[in-house]
Image: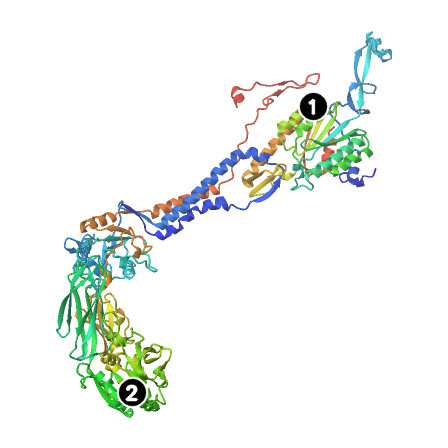
Amino acid sequence: MNFVLLNPLFTWLLPLVAAPVIFHLFLRIRKRQRPFSTLMFFQRISPRLSARRKVKEWLVLLLRTLLILFLLLALLRPVWYGVGSTGGVAQVIVIDNSGSMAGIARGDKTKMQVAVEAAQALIGGQREKDSVAVVLLVNDPNVTLPTGLTSDKKEKSELLGAVTRIKETEASGAIQQTFERAIAMFENSASPRFEIHILTDTQEVEWNKAPVGLRNPRSGTGVYVHRITTLATANANVAVTGLALPEKKILVGRKFPLRVELRNTSEIDGSVRLNWADDLGNKGTQEVPVPKREDKTVVLGFEPATPGIHWVNVWVEGDGFPSDNKAAAAFSTTEKRPVLFVGKDEDFGLFPMAISPSGDGRFSGLLPVFVTPAELVKAIDEKKPALVAVNWAAMGAVAGDSAAAATLKVWVERGGSLFVGPSSLGGGPPTPTIEWLGATPEPLVQAEQGFPVLAFQKGAAVFVELKDERGDIFLRNLKAFKFHPLKLEEKTTALFGLEDGRAFLAERAVGKGLVFTCGLALDPLWSTLPLKGGFLALAQSMALLGGEAGEENLVSLTAGDRLLTVPPGATNLHLQSITGNLLDWKGEPNKRPIFPLAGVYAAQLGAQTIYASVRSSPREGEAQFVKGATVPALGTVAHVVRTFDNADAILAEVRKLSRAVDFFLPALLLGFLCLMIEGFLANAKPMKPVAPPAKPNPLDGATVAKPDEFGFMKVSVKPPEKAAVKA
Amino acid sequence: MSTSAYKFLPPQFADRLRGLGLGVRGRVEGGTQGAHRSPHQGASVEFSDFREYVRGDSPQLIDWSVYARSDKYVIRRYQEETSLRAFVLLDTSESMAFKEEGAHTKMDYACYLAAGFMYILCSQADSAGLVIFNEGIKNSFPPVRSIANLRPLLLALEGIKPTGRSNIEDVLHKMAEQVKTRSLFIVISDCLADSTSILRGVRHMHHNGHEVTMLQVLDPAEMYLNFTGLAELKELETGERMVIEVDDLKDAYAAEVQRFIGELRKGCLDCRGDYQLVSTKAEIDDVIRARATMV
């Protein structure tokens, strides 16, 4: 048996009960003061009247306090469950199907299986006049449930079947939205009582967050959280926290690294097997030890053989919790890409050789192509280069041609990379020049013995493949013999320069593309940079960095997310899984479901296809659960938290709860009674003093005779009776 | 004497009082020949009684006509007539400052009454004294016989300021002991004290042969509460406060006042004294006239 306030918000008004006392003690009616000759007569009559008046005053005060108390009680709707009887009950069963429910509850049963059994017991235990609905914490599009309460026997039977199909997802749930979906089901229900049963493990990542503006359920609703406890596991839990593709263009025939980020979220050292498979049938596996509470990154190498969209699946085996072990990534590859050198071969020193050591694009996927400034516009349009390298002499010609300059700028803004530097043969800075380069060359500086060169921004993307394990850049002991120092603008980043701060290689982002401005020619006569082994990686990085057309169609999500945006005007959305969980959903874009499981999904919106790479939610593996008697995620909603024992116990408890006494009407009647008595007392006629007993007149009953001859009258008085004397 | 200077005895008031007389029920002892009966026999025209002649009596006093009829020597005796000595006892306690419905404060009203009575007494060749009291005797003026000699008494009335608390009983006891000759005491007060104690003083006076006329001056608002609602009353003499719901107590209050007045009236009458309830709303002339015509 328990006592529940159905409208606990009104407890805030409880201090109002003290209002009559406060008014009585501190805010009495302003009295008129008046001087008076004597209080003697009042003191003679008041001892009786005053005492009676005071008793009356306190009685009225008590009644007023009780009146407010009973009215508040009526508003609070106290219900004593476990006694009495009532009509049908509308039940909404909220099943937590988030990833954490994959944990073991008891024996070999997962929490999800236990929750499903409890839900089946609740549905099976329904009486004829009861109605029921099931709501999932993670709205899994693979499980179809009725959208409202059902009291039909056949529909309940179907619901039982649907419940058996509920599996844990790899996503985190949204408590507030789910709860509001649950209470919305009661809106049109005619049942006198409503119950929400939440079957969950109360994992902290979901249930420990206070809601913002959570609606209170309809009055008469009891909310019961059945906490399914988690069995401690002896295995470590290693989660896949991310898949990182290189921030470069991925080209066919060019190997690229895929970084798999792992995290051991447990207090046990773990060793897991990391598996991967791609769309071309390539697969691999390796053992990865991950110490407790540590992150680990594993780099996998891939070499796409064909252009187009590819995917790779990564998953972990051998740990204690499966729902945070998966990730998938989709990526786009293109054929070999040309690098346009605007000018002659001898103008660029060793730069073309660094772009393609073999000269035909093997190994690097980049093919050098030499064009004149006049051919630049056409070449950009036709060849779709990865990089355009322009020497200063050619840049003057391009800058002088407004159409060529505009085409170049648009191309860079869309993701192209532009390299501008002096010719190996010498020559001054370009005249005219392009404003948006972000750096202006200054007069040449020379030194036969050379200037020591430093890398300024080691964190720059262009240096990513030039770092050793300690994070240092391979390019050491560099010397520059002659260079044009660069005067940098605000948003331009210096990459290489001298110890005194003078820079000769700088980078600037323009739109999605990059502009590299160099103050020296990539020729051994100018510096030792082209002679270093890392020079190839640096040159190719400059070509491969920057965006790529079509990349906006690749999105990376976590299970539980939905496509953030859809193109305006799209009317039909078709979601299909490419790898991983099976999903095939069609409908209006604004009703698009979440992705409940890891995998790669294709979202078809008319002619456009968006590829979503979804990984499991790593938070679901955290083994912290809300333990108190209340659940913060339910905010101010009155609820009861019970530790789940077994399905039979929950059914017995629910049957007991179905009997209840509602104190609304009794409280209201008592309040009305108080009001009546208070009104009677407060408006009663003033009391009159009790008159003192009259003294007996000795002449009462006397008889007077006629006057005698002397004029005297004889008065005869009867002696008073005994009773009169006593009085 | 010009009366225009007196606040409480303006000429018109004095004119209206002219011709009125004030008498007493019992015998009094005045210092001079007057119009009131004395307890002593003496030379006058008012026959008193006979007594047997004894040795030492003047033979001239023998009633020879009686001797002729009865052969006994008897002497005819006559009632002595004397003047009246009256004292006006004026209560000046702070409660006398109360004024609600009346035209004057009770103090002013009492002063008019005192002046009026003293004027009447002097006009009929009696003597009038004045005793001003509150907790005790504050000031006293021995009886004067002429209107001209009333001046200090009338001026004293003008200087009165109601202060302090009232103790009528004590004053009555003192005056009963101090005044040896049978006199008239006109007590002008609101008598807002325990009726038993007041009447003890009155009985003392009566026992000593004095005659008491009690004039209880009350504002109409004191007899019945003329306001309503919740009020905090402050007693003038003590400063004591009391919160009352007037509507609840109105009837009980009026009944209690009537009971008190009844006690005082009965007590005074029991001692052969006079009692007169005076409302400050009443015409002063009428009040004086009512007492003056009592004899």
Q: What's the amino acid at mark 1?
A: His
Name the one closer to the observer, A308 or B99. A308
Q: What's the amino acid at mark 2?
A: Val
**The N terminus of chain A lies in quadrant:** top left
Name the one closer to the observer, A481 or A207. A481
Q: Position of residue B144 (x, y in %)?
A: 80, 30
Task: Tell whether A568 sits left or right of A31.
Answer: left
Q: Is residue A169 visible?
A: no
Give the letter of the chain under mark 1: B
Name the one closer to the observer, A259 or B294. A259
User: What number of labels is visible?
Assistant: 2
| Secondary structure found at label 2 | strand
- Mark 2 or 1, which is nearer the eye? 2
Q: Position of residue B262 (x, y in %)?
A: 62, 30
Name the one closer to the observer, A5 or B231. A5
| Residue that label 1 marks | B206
Q: Quadrant of residue A425?
A: bottom left
Which label sits on residue A390?
A: 2
